[in-house]
Amino acid sequence: MGIKFLNGGFLTTVQDMGRTGYQESGMSVSGVMDQRSAALANLLVGNDINEGVLEVTLMGPMMEVTEDNVIAVTGGNLGAKVNGKDLPMYQAVQVKKGDSISFAGMFSGSRAYVAFAGGLDVPVVMGSKSTNLKLKVGGFQGRKLGAGDEIGFSAPRPVLKNMHLRKITPEDFTATEQTLRVVLGPQDDCFTEKGIETFLNSTYAFTNESDRMGCRCEGEVIEHKNGGDIITDGIAFGAIQVPSHGRPIIMMPITRLPAATPRLPP
């Protein structure tokens, strides 16, 4: 089989690099929030980077392995464990039938990614395994995973060549502040000089009104010339909107693919 969920954690879904080509029909891309971490997890277990992974948010699930395989966990440190012992992150790890995989808590970052050698056996819908929660499409029955759910492995590989070499240096997600580089958009003339100065030189914090679509921020109000309402147009991932209330909303996800493919054994 593959894995059986004893509980699903806060929000655990199947995601890949997204469902592209259907936005004009109202179907959002979905996909992982951190493309780099998901891609690295897949590379560590010998998968294509677009293979479906488990995206684990904040508090992770508890799972039972029902078939031998190799896994890798990347992204934020949510305290991944196998049979109660710390699971090395950013490394290919063998798991056996009957092993338990759990997460102890959030130590750094907010999302972790679990890849399984050979991939997850879920339907490909419109070219993707990603879960669209709002439309209930893709992934596992179009929803988050919960107690009693089971997902099979597509082509499990109980062992990979050169296992001891299939690891990379873990990334650091402990920083509480980040400096973002921005390029002013086609509506920059809608802001006063003071508003642009405020935007480029202020510190903003995420609020609780944040989800996979966007992150609302609180901080200094960004001044418009004549209100913040404009004609709706297309936006890119990572774009920052500033509605009439003057506080920015960062549209998710922000693409962060590997700059170079890590050197891993075949």
Image (cartoon, rainbow, N blue to C red):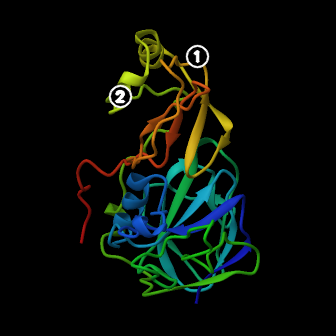
Label 2 crowding class (10 Å Cα cut-off): few <14, some 14-19, many 20+? few
What is the x, y in percent for residue 59?
A: 70, 54
Which label sits in the foreground, 2 or 1? 1
What is the x, y in percent for residue 29?
A: 45, 63
Q: Is residue 64 left or right of residue 129?
A: right
Name the residue located 43 percent from the left edge and 59 percent from the top edge: 38
Q: Secondary structure at mark 1?
A: loop
Looking at this view, name the residue that lies furthest to the top: 194
Mark 1 is on which residue type? Glu
State the residue position of label 2: 181
Can residue 149 be seen in the rendering of this structure?
yes
Q: Is residue 121 left or right of residue 257?
A: right
Q: Are marks 2 and 1 in contact (CB under 8 Å)?
A: no
Which image quarter: residue 155? bottom left
Label 1 crowding class (10 Å Cα cut-off): few <14, some 14-19, many 20+? some
State the residue position of label 1: 220
Q: Quadrant of the C terminus?
A: bottom left
Name the residue located 63 percent from the left edge and 42 percent from the top edge: 107
Mark pair 2, 1: CA separation:
18 Å
Q: Quadrant of the N terminus?
A: bottom right
Name the residue located 31 percent from the left edge and 30 percent from the top edge: 183
Name the residue located 58 percent from the left edge and 18 percent from the top edge: 221
What is the x, y in percent for residue 181?
A: 35, 28
| Disc sitting over residue 6 in the figure | none
What is the x, y in percent for residue 117?
A: 42, 76
